[in-house]
Image (cartoon, grey):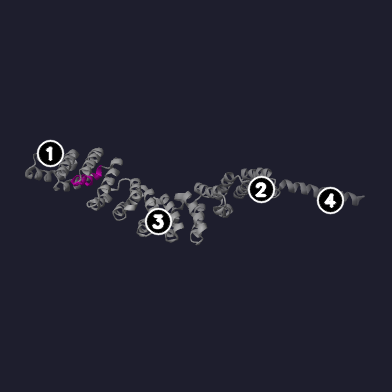
Amino acid sequence: MNSTRKTISLIISFFILFVFGCNQQSNFDKAFAYQKDAEYDKAIDFYNKAIEKGERVAECEKNIGDIFFGDRNYDEAFEHYKNSIEIDSNIALETVMKYMSYNDAHVRSLVGDRFAEIGNEQAINQINEALVKILNSGDQYKILDALAVISRMEDKCAPILGDIVKLLDSNNIVKLKVLEILPNFARHINDEDFDKILNLLSQNDEIIKTATIECLGNMHEYGKKASAILLNMVVNEPRYREQIFVATNKMGKPDKEQMGKLYSFLKDKSKDIKMHVLNIFDENSEGANEYVPYIMCFLNDEDSEIKQATRNVLVKIGKASSDCVPELIKLLNESNEEIVSRAIYELGDLGKASSDAIEPLKKIAETTTNKDIKKLAKDAIQKIQ
């Protein structure tokens, strides 16, 4: 009898321990067990409870992502993968990197989109390290997939820009993809890498040349350094004329230093190239007053249409700025009276900012035989004084 009671007592004790042990099982463990048994709704429920209690959160987010991915709810899956990587990149990163080459275009795009949203600097560094390994792998297809992800991440991949530019030495398929995404990093491209892009214009491959021109145009203001080279191509390789004009239009007006070089370059160039540059200023006249001295030189052109286009641009820009004074003074020595007159007018209109022009203006007033210029010079001196 006592033996029977002891046996029953032991069974009850084991049962209590079993129940107590089950009750002590963590939310994560319960969720994981349900996940293995394909009871996904219950698994997600307990994973969320674990997340609320701060229990193995990165793993919970990754596992929820796996459940949604298995159900082909890719958008929801990648939200959870992103959350996991944001907390601890070691948990889900390898899984997500594999999806860069998945057979569903939407999945591949989600990789880059979610990576772009990650703010954890350590995670971004790890992602970039993984991407560099792929870029240096020599596997064309994986490289193309990685470049597609990089194009969506944009600035977050700026630290590996050098590795991206190196691929311009690869085959044409990879090269074209690199040229397509480089405008996303335009503000980060240094002079050495920019020169590497420009070198592609000297290749004999028409497809690469066209893609390079388009790449430079899509860099907008950051591609301006290529303006003279591109316009020179119009002269030497006129078949690229339209692509080049589209590209330089996107770049907008060159900066003041570039304009100085550009004017010297344009002196002996064709009418259509000169008109194209004037049209850039006509369409982008705001803030262009520092260019007045260079634009005024087009008044010296023999072509009446160019002269008229120059007048239109100058009127649209308005008066010159004080930064133009040294260049305007130089124009007082021009043989073209229209340029001299315009320079005098601009100097006078600037008032005291043109004080350095008083002596040159006095000299013109004393030596010129043109009564209109003499009067303009005297009036300008009065305005300045």
Q: Position of residue 167 (x, y in %)?
A: 44, 59
Q: Position of residue 325 (x, y in %)?
A: 19, 45
Which of the two discs, 3 and 1, sits closer to the camera?
Answer: 3
- State how far apart marks 1 and 2 are (Cα): 88 Å
Q: Residue furthest front?
A: 239
Q: Which mark is residue 376?
A: 1
- State how far apart marks 4 and 1 are (Cα): 118 Å
Q: Position of residue 333 (x, y in %)?
A: 14, 48
Residue named by callout 2: 28
Q: Residue furthest right?
A: 1
Residue named by callout 4: 10
In this orientation, does residue 240 appear?
Answer: yes
Task: Say whether marks 3 and 1 touch (CB < 8 Å).
Answer: no
Q: Earlier in the sequence, mark 4 or mark 1?
A: 4
Query: Which residue is rendered at x = 52% and y = 57% of the image?
Result: 141
Give the residues in magenta: 289-302
Q: Position of residue 338 (x, y in %)?
A: 16, 42
Tag 4: Cα neighbours inside 10 Å, few (<14), some, or many (≥20)?
Answer: few
Q: Which mark is residue 208?
A: 3
Q: Secondary structure at mark 2?
A: helix
Tag 1: Cα neighbours inside 10 Å, few (<14), some, or many (≥20)?
Answer: many
In this view, the residue in front, 243 or 42, is 243
For badge 4, the amino acid type reads Leu
For badge 3, the amino acid type reads Ile
For badge 2, the amino acid type reads Phe
Q: Earlier in the sequence, mark 3 or mark 1?
A: 3
Q: Secondary structure at mark 1?
A: helix
Classify residue 194 by image quadrant.
bottom left
- State how far apart marks 3 and 1 are (Cα): 54 Å
